[in-house]
Amino acid sequence: MLHIRNIDELKSDWNGLLELLSTRFDADLDLQGVVYLIGVQELGHGPRSFSKDEKQDLMHIATCRLLSRFGFYELIGSDDEGWPHWQLVQKIPPMSLGEQDYLLKQSAIDYFREQGVF
């Protein structure tokens, strides 16, 4: 279930998540790094090397997964190689970069909580 956070709660939860994931993966992560990790998790093929195009696809998968929590995307299935495909079901309203980051961070926190990681 989506938990709507105020800005102070979001900052605290986000910093806690970054600290946990950065320690777990021995890397300094930011929003893009967290989105990439979600894409790898959603693909479900485990850790491996990905091409530049595959990395972009992973970021897209994760973004769709995160925005699906707000009703913007729905999973329509996977292709023969197991890559999930999403469909836009509700037009995303115009947002500032800060608003986009807020939505993605909020959803990422809830995602990792549901996964039992955070």
Image (cartoon, grey):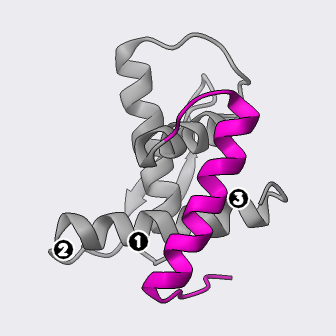
The question of residue 8 being in magenta is answered with yes
At a point 65% along the width and 49% down the height, the residue shown is: 19
Q: How crowded is the residue under tag 1: few (<14 C-alpha within 10 Å), some, or many (20+)? A: some
Q: In the displayed structure, would residue 70 be above or below residue 82?
A: below
Q: Which residue bears the numbered disc 3?
A: 112
Question: Residue 53 vs residue 17: left or right?
Answer: left
Badge 3 vs badge 2, beta-carbon distance below 8 Å: no
At a point 36% along the width and 15% down the height, the residue shown is: 52
CA separation in Å, label 2 and label 1:
10 Å
Q: Which residue bears the numbered disc 1?
A: 103
Q: In the displayed structure, would residue 98 be above or below residue 48?
A: below
Name the residue nearer the viewer: 113 or 44.
113
Q: Give the residue type that dot 3 points to.
A: Phe
Q: Magenta part of the protein: which range?
A: 1-29
Badge 3 vs badge 1, beta-carbon distance below 8 Å: no
Q: Is mark 3 on a helix, strand or loop?
A: helix
The question of residue 118 being in magenta is answered with no
Kindly identify which numbered label has been placed on residue 95.
2
Badge 2 vs badge 1, beta-carbon distance below 8 Å: yes
CA separation in Å, label 3 and label 1:
14 Å
At a point 44% along the width and 55% down the height, the residue shown is: 64
Residue 41 falls in image quadrant? top right
**Where residue 97 sits in the image (x, y, percent)?**
21, 63
Q: What element carries label 2?
A: loop
Q: Give the residue type that dot 1 points to.
A: Leu
Res. 3 visible in picture: yes
CA separation in Å, label 3 and label 2:
24 Å
Q: Which sits earlier in the primary sequence, circle 2 or circle 1? A: 2
Q: Which sits earlier in the primary sequence, circle 3 or circle 1? A: 1
